[in-house]
Image (cartoon, grey):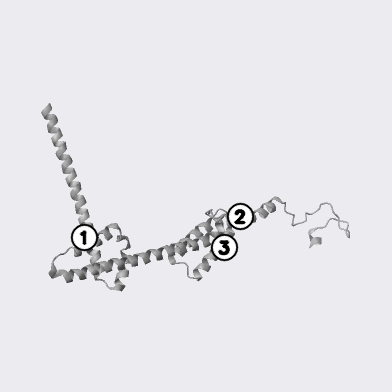
């Protein structure tokens, strides 16, 4: 019994070790792939011109995370630690390239973040201006709006902002779609009200008895000239 328990413990221990080794191998492989991708991006940035550099930064802005800056610093330190005098000048030049690249990248990313914040603030102000007709005293929005006049005010503000060049196509499409969604139920309700109004006189007309269009012939009435009842020939 004791031997069986020991065998089970040994088996579980080996299984746990294999699982741990497999997990470590997976993490190492993932880390290696990430490093290769970061190195490739660093090389592209280093070899690009000033115009291409800004474009690459914008296209790969999400790649400038903590791992990127750590890897760039590590590559710069690697150049500093090279003791081979034959390669001293080349290494110094490469080191300078990396340091200048890091400074340039930080400047571009900083400008990009600043412009993004400005656009967000500007877009927020524009949106507040458009939605102002449907805001209450505590700046809460009731959507869809209950007052049809607020939609007209919103559309006027939208046209004004568009003429001033403050709106892009995506923003306009989204706002117009929302306005159409709100306008459709109101139009249906308006049509229903008009239809009910038009039907009201018809009901009154149906309930009113119609007047006779022909005068009934009275029996026993004599002609004042002949003293007889009017015959067919006399009527003709």
For the residue carrying disc 3, how many other residues have a C-alpha within 10 Å: few (<14), some (14-19), or many (20+)? some
Q: Is residue 16 above or below residue 53?
A: above
Residue 92 lies in quadrant: bottom left
Asked if residue 58 shows in the view, the reply is no
Mark 3 vs mark 2, foreground winner is: 3
Tell me the CA gap for discs 3 and 2: 24 Å
Which numbered circle lies on residue 15?
none
Q: Nearer the viewer, residue 103 or 67?
A: 103
Marks 3 and 2 close (CB-CB < 8 Å): no
Lateral position of residue 109 relative to residue 207, left or right: left
Q: Between disc 2 and disc 1, whose residue precedes?
A: 1
Q: Which residue is mark 3?
A: 153
Mark 2 vs mark 1, foreground winner is: 1
Marks 3 and 1 close (CB-CB < 8 Å): no
Q: Between disc 3 and disc 2, whose residue precedes?
A: 3
The location of residue 118, given as percent across then percent down, is 43, 64
Residue 115 lies in quadrant: bottom left
Q: Between disc 3 and disc 1, whose residue precedes?
A: 1
Q: Which secondary structure lies at badge 3? A: helix
What residue sits 29% from the left and 60% below the top?
63
Asked if residue 205 shows in the view, the reply is yes
Q: Which residue is mark 2?
A: 193
What residue sits 20% from the left and 47% below the top?
23
Residue 225 lies in quadrant: bottom right
Q: Which residue is mark 1?
A: 36
């Amino acid at each position: 019994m004791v031997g069986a328990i020991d065998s089970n413990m040994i088996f579980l221990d080996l299984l746990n070790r294999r699982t741990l080794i497999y997990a470590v191998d997976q993490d190492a492989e993932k880390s290696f792939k990430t490093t290769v991708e970061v190195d490739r991006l660093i090389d592209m940035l280093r070899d690009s011109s000033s115009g291409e550099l800004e474009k690459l930064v914008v296209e790969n802005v999400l790649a400038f995370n903590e791992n990127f800056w750590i890897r760039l610093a590590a590559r710069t330190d690697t150049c500093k630690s090279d003791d081979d005098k034959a390669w001293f000048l080349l290494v110094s030049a490469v080191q300078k390239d990396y340091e200048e690249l890091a400074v340039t990248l930080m400047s571009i990313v900083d400008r990009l973040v600043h412009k993004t914040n400005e656009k967000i603030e500007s877009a927020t102000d524009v949106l507040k201006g458009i939605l102002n007709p449907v805001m209450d005293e505590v700046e809460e929005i009731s959507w869809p709006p209950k007052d049809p006049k607020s939609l007209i005010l919103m559309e006027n503000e939208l046209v004004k902002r568009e003429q001033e060049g403050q709106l892009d196509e995506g923003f306009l499409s989204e706002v117009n779609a929302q306005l159409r969604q709100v306008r459709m139920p109101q139009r249906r309700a308006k049509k229903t009200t008009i239809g009910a109004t038009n039907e009201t006189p018809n009901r009154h007309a149906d309930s009113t008895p119609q007047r006779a269009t022909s005068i009934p012939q009275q029996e026993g009435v004599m002609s004042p000239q002949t003293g007889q009842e009017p015959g067919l020939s006399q009527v003709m």
